Image (cartoon, helix red, strand yellow):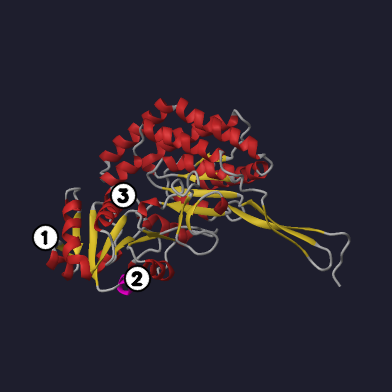
Amino acid sequence: MTTLHDELLTMGDAAVEAARQLVRLSAARKNKILAAMADELENRQATILGANAADLEAGRAAGLNTALLDRLQLNPARIKGMAEGLRAITHLPDPVGRTLRRWTRPNGLKIRKISVPLGVIAIIFESRPNVTADATALCLKSSNAVILRGGKEALRSNLAIADALQAGGAKEGLPPHSVQMVATPDRDAVRELVQMEGRIDLVMPRGGESLIRAVVEQARVPVIKHYKGVCHVYVDKTAKLPMALSIVENAKCQRPGVCNAMETLLVHQSIAGSVLPQICERLIARGVEFRGDEASRKIVPGIKPADETDWSAEYLDLILAVKVVPSLEAAIEHINRYGSRHSDAIVTQSVSAWRRFSRDVDSATLYWNASTRFTDGGEFGFGAEIGISTDKLHARGPMGLEELTTYKYVVTGTGQVRI
């Protein structure tokens, strides 16, 4: 009897072989495969939406909250967006085979440092079925094989999307097993995947903090991750009010259930008395609930009291922690203490304040007079993203094509031997 362990080892072996074939594909061939995948996604829209409707029905019955249902839901516009994302990646430069550096040693050896694929990448994710298409596209363009394991709440949607991608790609020469979807919701599949040394080169978990920590604790292969997105907007004393109002509203309300949405608002005490009531009025109209420190509650009495856990909370909902700070230095200290090193913004007209903020805040992405909601591979011009990293080794921030490559050295000689 074949066990789950055996099934996943077989998938891993097939992925290793696929990766060896993928590295031989030209950029033109990979682009044709991506375009065919995009076409097949649109051709199978009805099938994909039918599978997604079944997932949504099961999710509602299981009590999934509004934010999770929003992540899960597909519609014609989102399917079109997935297809367009695939097509956009065809216009990006091939990240494989680039000469990153070259030099000649005194003994005549010529050394080149060139970009190469990582090999086999495992993506473990929750809720968002669009990750299936985004991850596949980025892995294919960077000549990596991919094994996808989505959450049980999106299993039907993920399988339908993966089937479309495999069928479309096969029409243009996609090597077999380049894209594989783990079809079981069994949690043991995650443990098996992240311990497949020699078959998996990198694991990317995308989902809630509990999933990511479970992956890290069990993994025997490299993991790139971010645990959560505790993102801040600091409104400095020189901020222009209309700009601050617009940025704060967008960062919190545009899509509150995502990792780059603002979770904590910091306001300089010299302007808090005039600015904070207007911010609260605007966001309350959008359904936001506030939890604040003593100073903010004196200014806006309806704010609920915050406790220590609120400063490091990732609400993923229309809830916002608010704090009045005495200085830029206090804002920076708060962000570095409670933040998740994901995305943080300052609204200010002071160049020196921005320079201090950008130098001293230890986060993957920092914004000056812009919303944190732009931390996204598509918005950065990467076509899509494989995930967002708050690590400091290999990759940080939105991860696109370049972050899915490593490098090797190619040395050319004329008979040299070491003495």
Q: Amino acid at mark 2?
A: Ile
Residue 60 appears in the figure: yes
Between label 3 and label 2, give the one nearer the viewer.
Answer: 2
Label 2, label 1: how many angstroms apart (C-alpha)? 27 Å
Q: Residue at x 36, y 51 (%)?
A: 373
Q: Are marks 3 and 2 in contact (CB under 8 Å)?
A: no
* Residue that numbered label 3 is attached to: 257
Q: Can you give x and y, in whole percent of width and height, for residue 113 in the image?
A: 69, 58
Label 1, label 3: how many angstroms apart (C-alpha)? 24 Å
Q: Amino acid at mark 3?
A: Gly
Q: Amino acid at mark 1?
A: Gly
Q: Magenta residues: mostly which secondary structure?
A: helix
Residue 302 circle label: 1
Residue 306 appears in the figure: no
**Residue 191 in magenta?**
no
Disc on the earlier residue, 2 or 1: 1
* Residue that numbered label 2 is attached to: 332
Element at badge 1?
A: loop
